[in-house]
Amino acid sequence: MTGVQALEHKYPDKLPLPGQCAKMEFEYIRHGTTSLIGFFDVATGRMEMPYLNSTRTEEDFVEAVKALAGTDPQAPWTFICDGLNTHKSEALVRFVAEACALGLELGKKGKTGILKSMESRADFLHDPSHRIRFVYTPKHSSWMNQIEIWFGINNRKLLKRKSCLSIEELEASILRFIEQYNLTAHPFKWTYAGIPLVI
């Protein structure tokens, strides 16, 4: 999940001249933001069911998860997320309990049971016996989540030099980029060998 600004460059870029680099305007006019909730399939390298919305609340995240899980309602799903509070919300716990037909008493948020705290909700969502489960990356380890790599690609290849006049134009550009990216998508090759850094 990431926020994206619709930025219009205040002045046009300057094309490169012999012996000079192209110059990009750093001043911009902001036309609002959109939120991209994406699901990166590590097996295929594709971005599946992107969800664009003006907000990124727990309800937005649950709606996006529901839409993706609804494409194959009986399949097991494992989502890898960071520790953001919307990834451990009451609404998400209720959705997983209902979708997995667990029939559990969930308790009351902030008071009792599974809903008591963010930690108890995370433990429930992480349970490997559930058909839909969430795995959380450790703190300061966003580099382990491959969707962060994809967000970097999107930023470098599309957003860095993009000038948008509206949120609608930005969202259409993002969806076109995803569609084009998925045509040649392949899994990322993990190259880290586990060698500790020497300081």
Image (cartoon, rainbow, N blue to C red):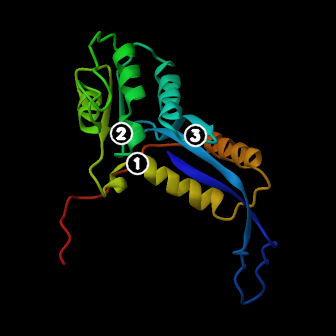
Q: Considering only vertical position in the picture, is 18 above or below 53? A: below
3 or 2: tag closer to the N-terminus: 2
Amino acid type, label 1: Gln
Q: Considering only vertical position in the picture, is 155 above or below 38? A: below
Label 2: element kind: strand
Q: Disc 1 vs disc 2: Cβ atoms closer than 8 Å?
A: yes
- Give the spatial CA distance, label 3 vs label 2: 20 Å
Q: Disc 1 vs disc 3: Cβ atoms closer than 8 Å?
A: no
Which residue lies under the disc numbered 1? 146
Q: Residue at x 42, y 27 (%)?
A: 91
Q: Which mark is residue 117?
A: none
Quarter of the image for residue 107 reads: top left
Residue 152 vs residue 139, the one in the foreground:
139
Quarter of the image for residue 139 reads: bottom left
Label 3: element kind: helix
Of circles 1 and 2, the one toward us is 2
Which residue lies under the disc numbered 2? 80
Amino acid type, label 3: Asn
Instruction: Please say whether residue 165 is visible from this viewpoint.
Output: yes
Q: Residue at x 18, y 75 (%)?
A: 198
Of circles 1 and 3, the one toward us is 1
